[in-house]
Amino acid sequence: MLGRWLEKLVAHGRVLSLILLGLMGALVLADILLPPDYVRFPWDGIGGFAAILGFAGCVFFIAVAKGLGTLLLYQNEDYYGEQHEHEPPPAERGRHD
């Protein structure tokens, strides 16, 4: 039963995505148009602030992760040197036992 339900969700994934994007847009629009009843901080009264802050936070974390990956993980293409598959490593070239 659960499998059929999941298969239907996957089959209608595009429609589901559009419905959810429309719902999110409607919520942001409602946040912009309807004034809040209680404002604790000055930026709480700005319509759509939570959506903008969430999007900016996601972009920030992606940029930090990309920067850390570039600095710490990525290596040059010739990191191991240029060596063909049929050639032995340089240390073993002179030795033929």
Image: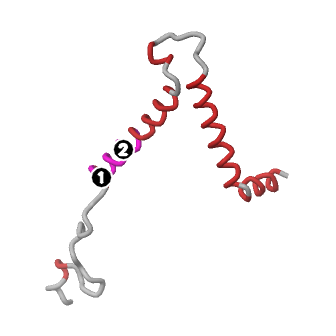
What residue span does the magenta drawing correspond to? 61-71
Residue that appears at 23% across and 79% down: 83
Q: Amino acid at mark 2?
A: Ala
As drawn, the residue found furthest toward the front would be 33
Q: Position of residue 96 (x, y in %)?
A: 19, 89
- The C terminus, quarter of image: bottom left
Task: Indicate which disc residue 22 carries.
Answer: none
The answer to whether residue 70 is magenta is: yes
Residue that appears at 65% across and 41% down: 22
Residue that badge 2 annotates: 63
Q: Position of residue 5 (x, y in %)?
A: 80, 52
Residue that appears at 27% across and 50% down: 71
Colouring convention used in this rendered image of the protein: secondary structure
Task: Indicate which disc residue 70 carries.
Answer: 1
Q: Decide: few, some or many residues near mark 2? Use Cα within 10 Å; few <14, some 14-19, many ≥20.
A: few
Q: Is residue 4 above or below residue 58?
A: below
